[in-house]
Structure formats: C-alpha cells, structure tokens
Amino acid sequence: MSLAASTAMRFPQPVRVGDLVGRDVLRPVESQDVLGRVRRIVRDHNGRIMVVVDFGGFLGFGARPIVVPIDAMVLLGQDMEIVAYTPQQLRAFPTFSGAGVSDAAGDTVIKVGLAKPSH
C-alpha cells in the first residue's frame, strides 16, 4: 500500500503548517519514545510536503535533521508519530541539507492523518 493510500485511511484533517512546527515526534508504540521534534515543513521540487525532523540525539543534543514525507506521519494529540518507518530505517536517512526544497508558509493548510493512542 502506498503512503498516500495509507494516509487516506487515517481520516486526514486540515492543519496549519505553523501549528506543526515544534511538536514532538513519537514512535508509535506503547512506550511512546520521543524520536525528535518537527523543525520545518518544506515542499520538494515536485510539490510534495515533507517534514524536517530533528532526529536522534539526547535531550536535543546531537540530533540531526532528516526529511520525512508527511504521508508517513500522523497526528496524535499535540504530538506527531512516524508510522511508516522504524527508528532503524530513520537512522539510515541522509542528513537534510535544504537543497531543492522551499519552506511551506506557516499559514499553509495541509492534510495530516490521525492516530489513536497506542496504549
């Protein structure tokens, strides 16, 4: 199943880009480990929405930015979860350089799927 098809099954809701920046990004398991924080929302050269996540590190130190498709993420209350990739897969993502993308304006409305709590 494609990421877009998976997102369509999660009741996508309209959300302002500016309301997503700064949210914690959780792992979708009962322990709800924090994987990082949303740094920016960008569009690639094809117009796809991507989320720049400060990934890894400890208490914010040593984190590196990676880019994750919005269709791989869901809203969970005030947080977001990455549901399409494991932490091991995310560790293999290249460090985000900013080349070939533009920032989505804070008042841009995008659709993000919803998740129910894992516990």
Image: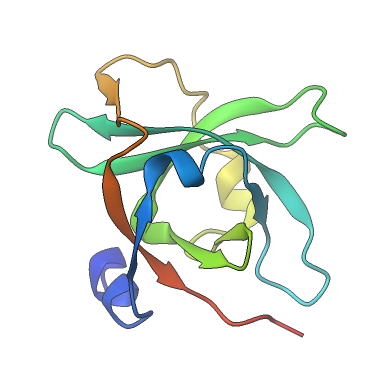
Q: Residue furthest front?
A: 107
Above or below, comparing residue 61 to residue 31 in the picture: above
Whether residue 6 is situated above or below residue 42 in the rendered picture? below
Q: Quadrant of residue 12?
A: bottom left
Q: Position of residue 35 (x, y in %)?
A: 71, 48
Is 59 positioned to the left or the right of 95 in the image?
Answer: right
Q: How is the image coloured?
A: rainbow
Labels in figure, total: 0
* Residue positioned 27% across, 22% down in the render: 101
| Quarter of the figure that contains the N terminus | bottom left
* Direction right: furthest residue: 59
Which residue occupies 76% across, 52% down? 34
On the rendered structure, is 119 left or right of 48? right
- Report the front residue among 74 and 15: 15
Along the viewing direction, whichever of 3 and 103 lies nearer the viewer: 103
Counting from the top left corner in percent of width and height, residue 4 is at 25, 66
Give the residue furthest to the left.
46
Q: Is residue 73 above or below residue 11?
A: above
Residue 65 locus on image (x, y percent): 57, 27
State left or right for residue 99 relative to residue 23: left
- In which quadrant will I find the C terminus? bottom right
Q: Position of residue 62 (x, y in %)?
A: 78, 22
- Determine the residue positioned at 53% across, 38% down: 21
Using the rendered view, name the quadrant where residue 17 is placed: top left
Residue 3 lies, with reference to residue 105, above or below; the image says below
